[in-house]
Image (cartoon, rainbow, N blue to C red):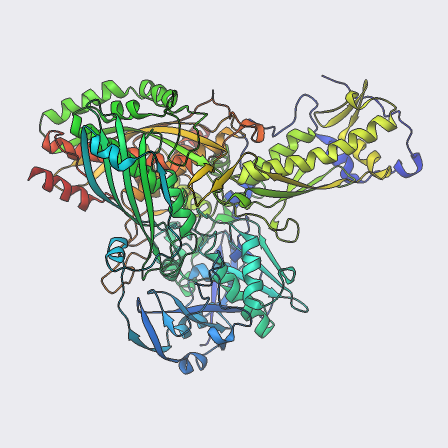
Amino acid sequence: MSRVHVTTTVNGDETEFLCDPRETLLDCLRDRLNLTGAKEGCGTGDCGACSVTLDGRLVCSCLVLGVEAEGREIGTIEGVAQGDELHPLQRKFIEHAALQCGICTPGILVAAKALLEKSPDPTEEEVRYWLAGNLCRCTGYDKIIRAVMDTAAEMREAV
Amino acid sequence: MSTDKTVTAPVDTELRSDPPVTDRLMRADQDRSGIKGAVHTDLHHDSAIKHVTGRAEYCDDIAEPAGTLHAYLGLSTRAHARIRDLDLEAVRSAPGVVGVLTAKDIPGVNDVSPTGLNDEPVLADGKVEFWGQPIFAVIAETRDAARRAAKRASVSYEDLPHVLEPDAAREADMPYVTPPLTLKRGEAVSAMENAAHRIKGRMRVGGQDHLYLEGHIAFAIPGEDEDVIVHSSTQHPSEAQHMVAHVLGVPSNAVTVNVRRMGGGFGGKETQMNLFCAVAAVAAKKWNRAVKIRPDRDDDMSATGKRHDFVIDYEVGFDDTGRIQAVTGEFAARCGFSADLSGPVTDRALFHADNAYYYPDVLLNSHPMKTNTVSNTAFRGFGGPQGVIAAERIMEEIAYHRGVDSLEIRKRNFYGEDGRDVTPYHQTVEDNIAPRIVSELEQSADYQARRQAVLDWNAKGGIVRKGIALTPVKFGISFTATWYNQAGALLHIYSDGSIHLNHGGTEMGQGLNTKVAQVVADELQVDIDKIKITKTTTEKVPNTSATAASSGSDLNGMAARDAAIQIKDRLTAFAAERWQTEAAKVRFVANAVQIGDETVPFADFIREAYMARVQLSAAGFYKTPKIHWDRATGKGRPFYYFAYGAACSEVSVDTLTGEYRVERTDILHDVGRSLNPVIDKGQVEGAFIQGMGWLTTEELWWDDKGQLRTHAPSTYKIPLASDRPRVFNVALADWSENREQTIKRSKAVGEPPFMLGISVFEALSHAVASVADYSVCPRLDAPATPERVLMAIERLKG
């Protein structure tokens, strides 16, 4: 099958790649652009391990085709830190030990960042239900929820 | 606090004049007041920064060499059938396909049975024994091409009768996949006859899929001669190595298996990865190109084993106070088509059928049933949870029979002194802290007042009912296969003072590498960031045991400590000789070595030692003492020690729909003297939630043809962030210390807290019982899905 040329913006950088029109955005990120932070947990949009943002909206990249990225802005876990400076969410996840095997962590951070951009002062219930689309099999979620709440508080103070 | 002095010992100034830059860097931020990352301190996971930035490399993230091929499995669509014809022409001719592998392409033995029973083919040969069994593998230029091609196979089957459930298997006289076990003490049958009260019951306990977020994966790279390197996500690299060698028909020394980290394991990657490693390796050698295999989630769940489902028939005899006189139990397990680890799993179910309770006369039998389902395997707790839940059901039965709070019945039956301290396998319980844990939790969770509030609430007779339960756990630590209780480690100190640590355990998120590094940091008194933790590889530490049975830190921590002590002893001898003093005056202090009244920075000291030709590398070893087990007589000391815990959960149940939520959970858990409290607490929380999932929302459901229909997270529901208890208080018993000489007096933590989830199950049962005024035991089966809860409510309402 002939490949399609896609021009897109990933984490602020203009990027091009060639892909099979049937290829998912997740596979394009991982295999074409070597951005392996997003993971395939289920391939059906049920686990959130592949979470990225598309024009600022939280999506499962396994349910988006690579060709749909044309002209759009993609945000991935690789763009969350500014160089060596971690995003407050990343710092708080480490401080609260809100990770174990770490494979769901990139997706959860991307999802949590999207929440805080939309809702800087979320209730705990809002955090729990927002993150219900991201499975974690290790932590039991408690430390994740605490880390997100703590980050939100810190970011509000910093404003 | 010591101060640095110039090194005055005789040194070769010519050679020392230009220390490497790294030496100076290593010393830059050293703190003499105490090391960073000592044992018994909170320390984040060593890969945490990589985890949060997406840079942690999992097997599927490893850069693929040019020309890497991808394998995909073709799975059976029958539960039990002869393969009449296997037509793979359409597969071979599909775009991008390089070739296919079937049973006849296996160069060595077509078998990956971990116990050597030769009952588990890599690829089915002539017949299939479960729906989802691998029949062939297709190898193609891309994963997508391989996956599409696999669907084009044409298989003609001749159906054979199939059996899915363990009780149906017993009725159908299906064979055992492995010899059963009997545990017997006293005369249970006559004691039962003489008991004041007797209750007989049956409980069905569902299995559980691991749902590690990273599925199975193996990536084989062919080497020269017979060599092959396999990167995989396995909890048991040594077994994967031996299995790949067995399947390739080459010696083990030709095969290297590497594991940097797993995206979750939970037992699901103990033996189940062997097949994927074998297929990748066979293909890599056949086509002399790198080959990766990664099934999609549905295939992963269909083709790989899970927690064993059990049907448990129990009988208990007890006196008027609710004290047990006799217990009998028949534990039938859905083992699947082959033995895999079903022997030790069903054994462990019997070992835990007492939980924390003394059974004066007891008779327990396991029935490891062959069924036409995927071969079930290890899963956190390893059969133990299925035993514990039977004990807790018995407590419930007695409580409802006597009209007494189940917590009171539990207390009356705890192990104690004076002849009430021997288990059904004749091991004496020497370290019983269950009563103290339970009593402290009862206070801190305000159990009595809250239970009364629950009873008062339910007395109003509303639609929403509440339930509360406090359940303990006692869990035996050690592999019951005694020879598994050994471990190795390899430690190098380089001449710049930096340290390379390797051990036989694997990192799956449990923080094992962090804990083992803490042990080494503590022993050598260096900051933990001077220690590089490296991937697990069969090249560095051979013949390792699976990272399983919660034993990772106990075994590997001790092995690493042994290696550190060996080097330390050599360094001490060197220092005593060079500085002309006694060994007793050589002390390893924070990032330095104190020799008499001189303090030499660690890196300088190591440089000295290197120049003096001191061996700075050691292989450490450990084997657990005291344990022994005679399976034939059912007697011994299979466990080095026990870990304890307790949980109290409160739930609300909608009696019109069966829906429920967990309002509050309080946990007090024993990890001895924790090596790393924040990591241990994470294990406790995660295990509790996973245990809760097992007993509530996670339902494996096979249709009558034998196809698993809940084979992805769309239909198989693990707990979500929204399911976490509304109030969740978790504490470690900070006063606890292991009585045995374990690594820094800590206790294993991986599995024991899994069983704390039983408190949610029992709380649901309590809420259900309220509709019949607590007059009957609701006898909920697990998982207690909302449907099952609703059915139980309807049943109790009559």
Name the side, left or right, on which A69 lies relative to B225.
left
Q: Quadrant of the C terminus of chain B?
A: top left
Asked if residue A94 is positioned above or below residue B714 in the image, the reply reads above
Task: Residue at 48% x, 56% y: name it.
Answer: B115
Q: Residue B400 placed where, x, y %?
A: 17, 29
Name the side, left or right, on which B588 lies relative to B758.
right
Q: Residue A9 placed where, x, y %?
A: 48, 56
Residue closer to the observer: A46 or A33: A46
Residue closer to the observer: B241 or A122: B241
Task: Residue at 42% x, 78% y: name it.
Answer: B91
Residue closer to the observer: B285 or B464: B285
Q: Quadrant of residue B177?
A: bottom left
Q: Residue A48 placed where, x, y %?
A: 38, 50
Q: Quadrant of residue B752?
A: top left
Residue closer to the observer: B141 or B638: B638
Task: Residue at 63% x, 28% y: name it.
Answer: B36
Q: Quadrant of residue B197?
A: top left
Which residue extends farthest left?
B798
Count the marks: 0
Asked if residue B47 is positioned above or below residue B708 in the image, the reply reads above
Asked if residue B12 is positioned above or below residue B31 in the image, the reply reads below
Task: Residue at 7% x, 38% y: name it.
Answer: B797
Q: Residue B692 placed where, x, y %?
A: 31, 39
Q: Quadrant of the N terminus of chain B?
A: top right
Q: Is residue B73 visible?
A: yes
Asked if residue B123 is positioned above or below residue B782 in the image, the reply reads below
Name the side, left or right, on which A105 lies relative to B24.
left
Q: Is residue B761 visible?
A: no
